Image (spheres, rainbow, N blue to C red):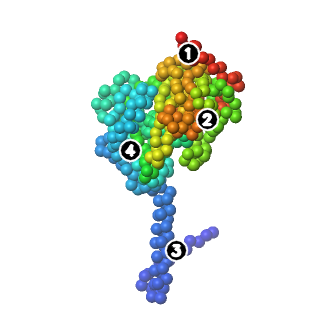
Amino acid sequence: MKTRHPVSRIPLSRIPLSRIPLLLSCLLLLLTTCKKSTTESQNQGNQQEIVRTISGVVTVNFAPGSVMTDNPALAKVQDTSAENNFNDIAPLFGVTDYLAYQVSLNLGTHAPLSENITAAWTIPPDFISSMPPNCRPALFAMVYQDGGEEIMDNFLPIESVFLESSGLLTATLPYYIFSNTRSADQSWSAILMVAAVQDTIPYLMLPVSDSCGGNNILCPIAQCSLSSISSPFTMNRLHPIQNEVKPHTGVDLRVPDGSDVVAVADGTVEWVKVNYKVTWDGKPSGYGLYMIIRHDDGSATLYGHLSETIYKVGERVYRGQVIALSGGVPGDQNSGGSTGPHLHFEYVPKGWILGSKNRVDPFPCISSEPALVLPQGLCNE
Ligand SMILES: [Zn+2]
């Protein structure tokens, strides 16, 4: 059986004077240790809850440990190029209207430590009453896709919940909407927008699959083999221009400029765009001229650095049909950030493709049959 010793208390008056310097140095040591452990806890994230508000509109709540800074900034922004970007993408997500309220969140020089950054929008009653039937407010964030040559910034929907009774739209902000590549000071920022969307966007409603489910697509170029790959799909690629390791979310196929590019499966042209940007440090980047096809099984493919496209948005295309000509010769906007002639090809089994976390290596999905290369226009006349 253990016996408990009572904690002894020594009255201050009974401490001998000679012991005071020793006691003082012990106290000093204790204080230093305390200070050190505070610094350590700051390195693991700010341990205090931080709340930022734009009165009556947005509240962002940083849970303890979610950010390194104790001074994150929330601000209303009026960025015309971001707004144009949003106007471009809005019809694809069934956006009917949006709040004239872009918000930026800046975390200073440190990346977010967790996704526990909750944001809540108070949606004005007149915005709710002006929404068409079957619409709800949804959150969009700019997602910086850094796939090496294919750098771009695009608004994408972020999972959010709208409570009609309170008029509150809430979301947990994923780490990948924060980027430190938008500005020269390399601070980590996110740009957010609220819009009314239709509830029924077919490809966003489909369950997400993480594979191609069988060898069901053609190769997009005629002469296709493993040796055609000049840069594989990888989450860790050494970037040819920036000399940094970055993901490459598609496969680069070596083809001479002006080669036929075929649709890998039946589908409809979803998007044709030029994405060309010079980054703040003067480097050309982007997909250049690119096309997205939505296939009949819900999957989507993207063809980048094209010199010419043959079909327009909404037109039907068929497996093996020539839909575009390849490009990639550096120097013009259609090439984007390309370093030489090639086709950049991406595949997503389900859902939205740009910036998607669901893109897979398309090569294992390619059937062993050769690309058909039907003459352009054969099937839709
Ligand atoms: Zn590529």
Of residue 321 and residue 268, the one placed in the foreground of this image is 321
**Disc 2 versus disc 4: distance between alpha carbons?**
34 Å
**Disc 4 versus disc 3: distance between alpha carbons?**
58 Å
Residue pictured at 61% horizontal, 44% vertical: 237
Whether disc 2's CB lies below 8 Å from ligand 1 is answered: yes
Residue designated by label 3: 6
Residue designated by label 1: 377
- Which quadrant holds the N terminus? bottom right
Q: Earlier in the sequence, mark 4 or mark 1?
A: 4
Residue pictured at 44% horizontal, 28% vertical: 93
Where is residue 299? Give x, y as percent: 57, 26
Residue pictured at 37% horizontal, 26% vertical: 96
Residue pictured at 35% horizontal, 29% vertical: 97
- Which quadrant holds the C terminus? top right
Q: Amino acid at mark 1?
A: Gly
Where is residue 296? Give x, y as percent: 56, 20
Q: Earlier in the sequence, mark 4 or mark 3?
A: 3
Q: Earlier in the sequence, mark 2 or mark 1?
A: 2
Does 136 sit left or right of 276 as displayed? left
Residue designated by label 2: 252
Q: Amino acid at mark 2?
A: Asp
